Image: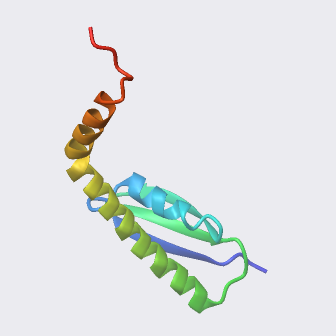
Amino acid sequence: MDTPSAVVTFDASLFSEETIKKAAYTFAAAASVDIRRSGVEWVCAFRFLRPMKPEDIHETVESFRIEVLDQDLRERVAAETRETRNSILAVAFSRTGLQRSE
């Protein structure tokens, strides 16, 4: 029996490789995902680890698309809040006594 597969593409100007890799990792129990750049797109080729019905493949692919959007949002929020987060951590660690004053 052939291993079921599917291909999903994303605009490379909208999504980073890191975002797509993080999303793919969440599907590691169901499929391996080969990620490659082809021109202006990321091409994600799924190879499912077990036989699946077409509707299950469709559902998994759509869940992957949603996960890519979620990871992209997480990446953007982290970038936008990095300075504030680092400031909070600096203040928190400055009060621990881990750093010596000279």
On the image, which quarter does residue 70 sit in?
bottom left
Residue at the spot 32% in from the left edge and 56% down from the top edge? 75
Left or right: 93, with 83 as reference point: right
The C terminus appears in which quarter of the rendering? top left
Question: In the picture shown, does residue 25 fall above or below 102?
Answer: below
Q: Quadrant of the N terminus?
A: bottom right
Q: Position of residue 15 (x, y in %)?
A: 32, 60
Q: Position of residue 41 (x, y in %)?
A: 36, 62
Horizontal and vertical percent position of residue 66: 40, 75
Tell me if 66 is positioned left or right of 1 in this view: left
Please determine whether, in this image, residue 63 is positioned above or below residue 77: below
Q: Quadrant of residue 30?
A: bottom right
The residue located at (30%, 30%) in the rendering is: 95
Look at the image and name its color scheme.
rainbow
The answer to which image quadrant residue 97 occupies is: top left
Task: Name the residue at 70% across, 71% down.
Answer: 49
Q: Is residue 61 left or right of residue 79?
A: right
Could you tell me residue 62's position as x and y percent?
46, 81
Q: Does residue 93 appear to the left or right of 5 in the view shown?
A: left
